[in-house]
Image (tube, rainbow, N blue to C red):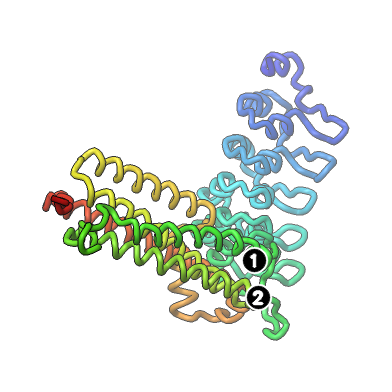
Amino acid sequence: MVDLLLEWRPALAGEVDSDGGTPLHFASSDGDRAVVRAILRAGPPGMVYKKDYLGGLSALHVAARMGHRRVVEDMLEAYPDAAELRGGDGGTFMHAAAREKRSKVVSLAIGKTKLRGLLDAQDRDGNTPLHLAVAAGAPAVVEALLRKGKVRTDVLNNDGRPPLDLATGSTSFFTMVSLVVTLAAFRAKLRPHRQDHAKPWSGGDVGKWIDKMSDSLSVVAVLIATAAFAAGFNLPGGYGDNNGKANLSGSPVFKIFLVLDTVAVAASVTAVILLVYGKGSRSTGSWKSFAAALLCMWVALISLLLGYYMALSSVTNTRAVYRVGLIVIYVGVSVLQLCIENWVGPSSSSCTVWRFFLVHQLRRSKGRRAVKRQFPLAGASVLSFYAYQVITFVAFIIFGFFLEWKGKTGTSPAQAPSPL
């Protein structure tokens, strides 16, 4: 239909509404490539350069804002010089994409040599796409610009602020961590200022969140401790009638169960103590006890799950039980791990995180103290997250080793002594 209308009257493509929007603006906003191509092919020349009255945006800016990479590509193929178009705020389509967290459009510009000059371009306020991506809280865009685009991290905007300074405006804790880790990994620095005037990041009321979460986690930790404590007395296989000892005391699997149950009790009780201490102290370092308590709870939970499987293995020889237990534990822990990684893990790639530790932690780069003072929770939270991953990895190794050993030895559960 669009082709027929444009063939009948090509000037229709140049009509504007009360806001200055052309049909190309609307098609770009919707991401309709067929309509965009039809207008570019049959419409009046230079339609891409027309700007609306609201923000002085061209259709290219609109497509970039909406994240329609293919539409942006079509426009740039038809009008390569349109990449230099500036909007009402003095920004290019790259600025529009970075502000709206459109990583696909940003990656398009990074991948084309002719567009590399736009990566460090500044708008009317002196902001580069990196500035806007940091301000918008877009770690994926920031990492793409730094790792693939090789953009500069020392460009100052009109307020004299480099990109890392803008991370202080983030209200999400996990977004802040991802931004700081990514920027610091590529040697970004804060603007020079007196350190006694520096105020640590406190966006999103992290202290209140920790205080509230401590109440719920304390209940969970007590429940884990109760379950583990009860399992230590309600032993699999029961007790002997004469001496009161466990019937399965000679079984290697039973001994492993006792070790895991003891670890679960100790770790969960430690978590409760840390949570109570952190809530009672209300100091600036209470987040350390909170992070340690989370790790202890994870150790207790993993130990309890493995202990359950060991208890199951010690009282049955049925292979189906082993397989069901394997599926339940492996799938359950794996799904839980993926959820935790998605919720609280840094958005930065593993390569960037390791670079952060190498550049910012081990080599003690310049500006390290300033970044640590401004964002005291960033590095510690990443360390805690990777400690959690190590704990999970070790748990899987232990479980896999036990399964292999079980398959080779074919250990059967110890027989309870006959009461006769």
| Residue 383 seen in the figure | no
Tell me, yes or no, whether the two marked residues, 2 and 1, touch with CB atoms within 8 Å: yes
Where is residue 288 shown, x and y percent of the image?
Answer: 54, 73
Residue behind mark 1: 211
Left or right: residue 92 compared with residue 119: right
Whether residue 79 is situated above or below residue 287 in the rendered picture:
above
Image quadrant where one finds the N terminus: top right
Where is residue 110 shown, x and y percent of the image?
Answer: 54, 51
| Disc 2 packing (10 Å; few <14; some 14–19; many ≥20) | few
Q: Residue furthest left?
A: 409
Q: Amino acid at mark 2?
A: Arg
Q: Amino acid at mark 1?
A: Asp
Where is residue 396 shown, x and y percent of the image?
Answer: 31, 56
Residue 400 position by quadrant? bottom left
| Residue 321 seen in the figure | yes
Rendered residue at 27%/54% (across/down): 238
Q: Work out how far the residue at label 2 is from the one at label 1, CA to CA, in angstroms.
A: 8 Å
Tell me the SS state at disc 1. Answer: helix
Where is residue 296 shown, x and y percent of the image?
Answer: 45, 66
Residue behind mark 2: 282
